[in-house]
Amino acid sequence: PLIRLADYQPPAWSVSDVDLEFDLAIERSEVRARLVLQAGPDPQAPLRFNGEGLELLEILLDGEPLPAGRYRHEHELLTIEGVRHGQVLETRVALAPAANTALEGLYLSGRRETGFLLTQCEAEGFRHITFFPDRPDVQARYTVTLRADRERFPVLLAGGNPAGHGELENGRHWARFVDPYPRPSYLFALVAGRLERISQDYRTADGRDVALHIWAEADVIDRCDYAMDALVRSMRWDEQVYGRNYDLDVFHVVATHDFNMGAMENKGLNIFNAKYLLADPDSSTDEEYLHVEAVVAHEYFHNWSGNRVTCRDWFQLSLKEGFTVFRDQSFSADMNSASLKRIQDVSTLRRAQFSEDAGPLSHPVRPAQYREINNFYTATVYEKGAELVRMLAGRVGPQAFRQGTDLYFERNDGRAATIEDFVGALGEASGIDLSPYLAWYGQAGTPRLQARGNYDPANGRYVLELAQSTAPTPDQPHKKALPIPVRLSLFNADGQAQRLRLADSEQDLGTETVLELTDQRQRFEFTGLSQPPIPSLLRGFSAPVVLDADYAPDQLAILLRHDPDGFNRWEAGQQLALMAYDRLYRGEDASAALQAWTEALADLFAQPDLDPGLLAELLSPPSETELAERQVDIDPEHIHHLRHQLNDAIAARIGLPPLLARYQALAAASTSALDASSQLRRRLKQVLLGLLSRLDAKVAIPLAQAQYATAPAMTDRLAALTVLLNTGAAEAGPALADYRRRYADNALAMDKWFAVQARVPGAAALARIEALAADPAFSLKNPNRVMSLLGIFARANASGFHRADGKGYAFVSHQLQVLDALNPQVAARLATALNGWRRLESGRREAAHAMLRELAARPQLSRNLAEIVNRILEG
Ligand code: ARG
Ligand code: ZN
């Protein structure tokens, strides 16, 4: 059924207190639930609780067994008529964790003999554990008792504070947990099995002593230290920046190799995909360290933005996710280079969200409808949602933003809130009417911002004309104008920022200001400019839009050389690259743009004091996904070659000797040190090796081979392997074999072994992927492995996947069908790779269309996959 935001009704029956008892075992576990019932607006209404895949063993009301005629259990609902406020509903159900391959509800991680049990409830997993009104606006107090065999399950954990434990007969034991804070069912969690831990004491700013524990299986427990460090820094940061303190006596974090998403913020018991928790220099890349830091922070920050204040319904998902992503981005920016962080976040947004928004899966940050909520944990809800919070924060300024978030947390503590509650609190604290920004939450699609400037030397006036438009998206043929904050400076030809004054005002605005475009089209007139200005627009990416400005290549080159805003400096280079690309694509002369771009880059390359991390980003052209957004009837293989031409142009302009010299200097100083500057130099080294490999493979291959052999850390090893693979070097084979020997027992490192091969572009990709899918180390049951091979192939290797002969589609379609029967959530995510099919050239489009139609016609599709396939087909 289609669920609509407009149909929201408060729950007919909710629950104030939950008492859960688990008798845990791998094959069969039992759950007893005692629920204190709370009537909604109509006390005569029947009670309808969710329950899926539950074997009902017993049902009682106020201690009396319910006769069969008093209740119905059908269509994944338990219905009871005539219940009264305050009555206690008691059920006993049986579950089969080891058979649960969907990894939703209670399931087994690892093997039957050695693995452990855990739960994943967001969004609607709790209904796979017991009968319950499984919706976030039902908030209850939880008491949870776990019982299990002590030898098989020495560790028993649930969310909340510990409230006793002890021995039972027959080698069994028990442990109890009480959470004093009312919470929604999606935050329920338990973990049981053989786990090791590392621990640290923490005292919050408001004086609470907290025991922090990170749990993992014995073979990986020595890779948890960085996560603990990141956790402590996150806790301090949230105290200092948002005034938020942790609120229980213990905080548990658990790593698992079997997880559908990144991580989960269950109250007091965060559960992580091991990929985002474990880190060590030998097997993790620098990028992975950054991800661990960001995700640890993200889940921790949810304790307030998500748990203490939760969402009224799943349409409000971005209320917690967009805000929490904004919070983790700000944290990472404070911990590392802020401008690099911004560059990376915007790159991610463009790659993942803009492309999502440009196809049939486009949806608003607050969707209006869904069939399967798990399909809406998207780049739009997360990353675009974070951009909306960033715009609001920028609009009200840092002080009012903090006052606004204080007000939001205070007013909504213990409540299930809406996006209006959030925007309203910021508006009230700042005294600014933010209601126009709500339109951003309801309107899908990426706005295009057109900027046209006109300078009149006679009177020193500069008129900037801004206009916006948003293309229609499924369900939204007509788009409204949105408020778009445009942060800008005006530069002279020598790269000096000019002082700004608007024509209708006497006020000196300094060298940077924010214009707010609120209508379809507006003019802004600046006065007192002695030279024709070069506008630096949308500084720091002040709004999530596509900018269309009529720059001349030389103007962008000036910004690329001089703009002190690190983000916009990078952006100027990207714009130049796009300008060159567009011309190359149309078969036109691209030399003016290419020359302006590569000359500036070569000069920047020669500056010894330029930040190596920024330089690495400057030397990286836009991704193929971004390039593919710019045309219709695309041929991904052609785009792949054009992107090579951009890289080739950079490499040729800088020249072999300087590239080599810089690479060698960096290589000679290689270490495994994890400090920021070592990481940034590694990043630059990696980019330089890539450029060298384009310029002269004969030079680069031995360098890559040596780098692989002597790599002190994973970043270097993987970068070298990538170059060996991409150049088709014979040396790639032995390196892959060596890597495999070395990391055979390290699942996360083996994921990268699959991923680095899945990424190799071109016609040979499919055969390689097919062979890897048949490798005994591959498994459709493990989401990380699936995403490393099939996810990378279908979503990050366009030239390999979108083959003209359609065989890439046929292969993925087959895998999707097998996968869907095991794990619908992961199958649906993989299928989003076809989102852009309509924009392919006709041959590929027909092949993709046929594959999608065939898939849609299959009778057994999960709700998850069916929704994605049908939306992609019909949108
Ligand atoms: N709330 C989690 C986060 O921090 C995501 C969990 C989503 N899980 C799912 N199966 N939809 O982002
Ligand atoms: Zn989240």
Image (spheres, rainbow, N blue to C red):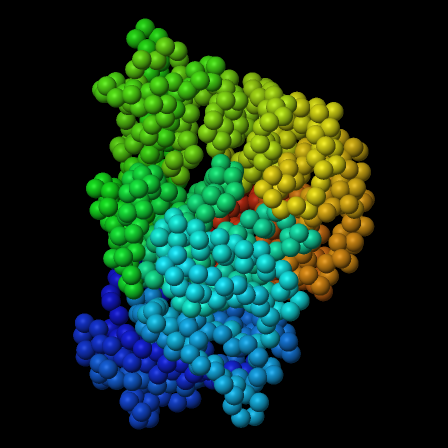
Q: Residue 833: x percent and y percent?
A: 53, 51
| Residue at the image position 33 percent from the left and 41 percent from the top | 398
**Residue 300 vs residue 393: left or right?**
right
In percent of the image, x 79 and y 42: which residue is there? 705
Expressed as whole percent of the image width and height from the top left, the position of residue 544 reads 40, 39
Question: Is residue 20 placed above or below 457 in the rendered structure?
Answer: below
Residue 659 can be seen in this image: yes
Residue displayed at 44% across by 81% down: 164
**In the image, what residue occupies the spot 52% across and 54% down?**
230
Q: How many marks?
A: 0
Percent of width and height locating residue 666: 70, 35
Residue 376: quarter of image: bottom left
- Residue 361 is situated, as x and y percent measured from the top left of the image, at 43, 50
Position of residue 707 relative to residue 146, above or below, is above
Is residue 599 depicted above or below 331 in this figure? above
Q: Considering only vertical position in the picture, is 136 above or below 771?
A: below
Horizontal side, residue 48 vs residue 216: left or right: left
Q: Quadrant of the N terminus?
A: bottom left
Which residue is farthest top? 458
Front-most of residues 683 and 210: 210
Left or right: 748 as drawn, with respect to 859: right
* Residue 375 seen by the camera: no
